[in-house]
Image (cartoon, helix red, strand yellow):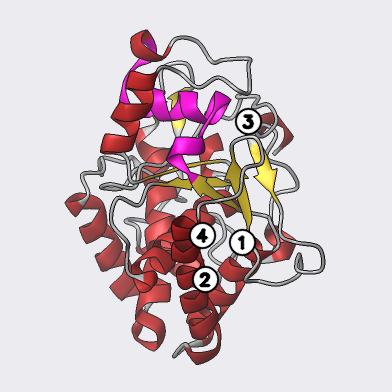
Amino acid sequence: MRRAAIALCLSIPACDSGESPVAVTTPPAGKADRADAPSYVTTDGEPLPAREAGIFASALSELARLSIEGTSGRQRDLARETLERIGEGDVLLGLIASARGEDLWHMCMDYLDVNACGVLPSDPAWSGTPDLKKLLLENLDGYQWGNRLYFAFPETPEPAVLAITLVHEVNHALNRSECSYYRDLNTHELDPTLSFVEEYRAFIAECAYRRGRNATADRCDTWAHTELVDRGYDTNADLSLVLDPGEVGTETIAKSLFADDGRFGWLTPKDSRWPMSFDGCRSF
């Protein structure tokens, strides 16, 4: 979730989120079943600007390409299922500038603190202050909460790079990482072990997508650790809390994810595994 430039945020299991804080722009009639017709998180139902819509479309085209041309079944599955979750409106794409209400508050809490952000707003249209929005736009390239993915594009990213990011972030949404990430939602204090597992899993999904037929559990385990360290994540996890006696290290988690057996969460965002609701962690 938190990445260098891509910050993602999550909540404790007892959190009780409200409805989506901003309007959802759905695809035109007749296109809802097409994987190139995503739904967007916008303010008051306004259409997404043409430049940003084009950026998303290019990344989705890259996912579509690899869903056919990928060099392994796992890579093709990750591309296809990520594309389908976005195309079917299970994941909503938007811009940081459009964030309101609860989602904006969580952005503030992850970047600032409770003194700057106040209490969780009950108004879904809460927009903070101009200074807050300016600060977030200057320092965040992306943010995830629930099934909403927010981005800022000061420069146009390569479609392949954004496609990789979408695979990573959709994995977080699939596993409802926000329901495990924090010890305390009110302060956004991280749980070092559970937040590590959430990020590690998403990087394993990213590695499997990136490497195609060259991806193995061992290679992706090594790669995920390198990415976590390079991006400044806390790697001081107590894995004894999630592993069985006698199991050591993250290799067990990587092998489980490659088997996609669900023991440490899911790798591929299949429709049958998708959360029934994102209204709150109690309903998960």
The residue to which callout 3 is attached is 21
* CA gap, disc 4 and disc 3: 21 Å
Crowd rating for badge 2 (residues with CA inside 10 Å; few <14, some 14–19, many 20+): many
Q: Residue at x 35, y 52 (%)?
A: 153
In this rendering, position of residue 165 left or right of residue 80: left
Secondary structure under badge 1? helix
Q: Secondary structure at mark 4?
A: helix
Query: From mark 2 to mark 3, how far is it between C-alphas?
Result: 25 Å
The first of marks 4 and 3 along the sequence is 3
Question: Is residue 186 shown above or below 248?
Answer: above
Label 4, on which residue?
53
Q: Nearer the viewer, residue 130 or 208?
A: 130
Q: Residues within 10 Å of mark 1 (few under 14, many from 20)?
A: many
* Residue 111 is one of the magenta-drawn residues: yes
The residue carrying mark 2 is 60
Upstream in the sequence, badge 2 or badge 3?
A: 3
Q: Nearer the viewer, mark 2 or mark 4?
A: 4
Residue 181 in the image: above or below residue 256: above
Q: How many numbered dots are placed on residues in this image? A: 4
Q: Give, as a three-letter code, the residue at label 4.
A: Ala
Overall secondary structure of the magenta section: helix
